Image (cartoon, rainbow, N blue to C red):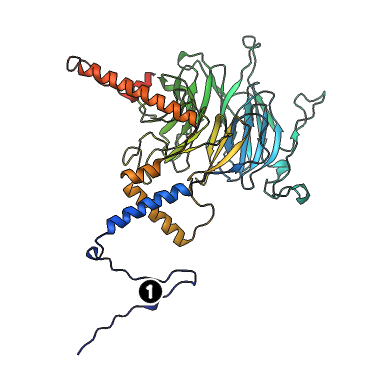
Amino acid sequence: MKVKALSRSAASTTRASINDLRPEHKNIDPSSHPQARAREYTRAVTAAKLDRMFAQPFLGELKGGHVDAVSCLAICRTNLCPVVSGCVDGTVRVWDLQRRRMVANLEAHSRNVSGVAFGNGVEGTFYSCGEEGLVKMWSIYPRDQYITADAESDDESDGDGYGKKPRARRPNRNSNDEEGAESPHGPHSVYRLPTSRSNAHQSNAFHSIDHHWTNNQFATASSDAAVHLWDPERNTPVATFDKLWGSDDTVTTVRYNPAETDLIAHCSNDRGIGLHDTRTASALQKTIMGMRSNCLEWNPMEPYNFVVGNEDYNAYTFDMRRLHRPTGIFKGHVGAVMSVAWSPTGTEFVTGSYDKTVRIFNVRKEGGTAGHGANNTGVARDIYHTKRMQRVFCVGYTLDHKYILSGSDDTNIRLWKARSSEKVGQLSAREEASLQYRQALVQKYVHLPEVQKIAKARRVPKFIKKQTKEAMVQKEKRRRKEGNVVKHSRPGTKGFTDEKAQAVVKTVD
């Protein structure tokens, strides 16, 4: 009689460590598991509940906040730690994101700081512009020293590990120097627009600033309806684009394209979004929307796409090759969208609004493109808010795609998790595998009512819920009225309006 014995290797039955579970051998034959789908569905419901139970996106505020509303925010392109913020009272503050504390408080401008931008090098240079008509160059490294979490001595630290609040360094003015002495961080250079007899009594306020992605130059948007290009070695603009498409309205936002680095996009008060080429000094195309756009950002991974935040409570994504129609409309806010910022992966962006909330929108699925496998539902995947947070003026993603910064009218800069239920810190192999399995289960069964109700439910403030309900009633009324008009009109004479085509009023070449 011949007997066949089962044999397994020691590696398949031995634990890697005493903390691991013992390996179990399972029969993968479907006939042995008649209730597999039912068990999977139960696990999906449990996974959705766990995801919402552990959703705690708010991590804290940056220690030593501003004393007035935070108007702008800049995150370094080459380093994870440095962050610079500007305030309505004219101060600029440098932050160490690793320890969540302020490193320097600089009295930069006499009026509102309208924009800050980092340079593209490793020197730590950043620029600030103000509404008094000055652009100043600073450095995050005081006296050629790098800002680290241990920069201050131990006797200056308080009990929780954060440094004490540094004093604001205002340059000491004297009779020989108009601008005064420099602080350890600067200003190293001061730039202003040249004055003439025609504009001697005008205040050319700067409203936005952005640095070139490769070259050592920056661009500003000012109230004289022009976009100015600057060389840091010169204190006057090297090029000026004025009378853009015959418009005399103020330019509020200017941004360089990450790939086509000689392409600039801007927003203006005439509700326009324009593109122009700095090489040929020519205007390319301009689109006029129904209401004014407050902010604009290019997609870092798909540089032909950009997103704008509008006064009509929506965010719009555009393809720069077809400006006559937005590629997506993202809704949900009940106030004007004041700021937008792309994730470094280019798959999602975050918006800050006048309705005191921060929302995260998915543009496309992981691994897909904007046109294939898209998920342009226009609904935010997550909403962040607190009881004390007021109107949000600036938002930003960190370079590791894990955290979000928001600056609001209540003088605070808050730090959020990009994924509300994600664990902070390193995951073990088992934790990572379990997390991926639960996410796959929720994604597989999210179309079912019970899972969908749990996974997509969000608590929002009462006034936002009330205004959202009113907006839905108004939308349903318009849709019903339009349907009745189409139904009772002669066939072919009336049709349903295209919401995307209706967003753009006209395009100007």
Residue placed furthest toward the left: 491
* Residue underneath mark 1: 12
Q: Is residue 186 visible?
A: no
Question: Residue 172: horizontal and vertical position, in percent?
Answer: 79, 29
Q: Is residue 65 left or right of residue 415?
A: right
Using the rendered view, name the quadrant where residue 10 is placed. bottom left
Q: Amino acid at mark 1?
A: Ser
- Residue at image location 28% in from the left, 83% down from the top: 5
Q: Is residue 84 visible?
A: yes
Q: Is residue 112 left or right of residue 253?
A: right
Question: Residue 307: horizontal and vertical position, in percent?
Answer: 44, 31
Front position in the image: 37 or 220: 37
Pick the quarter of the image with the N terminus: bottom left
Front position in the image: 389 or 507: 389
Front position in the image: 61 or 256: 61
Question: Residue 331: horizontal and vertical position, in percent?
Answer: 41, 30
Q: Is residue 508 above or below residue 41?
A: above
Secondary element under disc 1, as helix, strand or loop, is helix
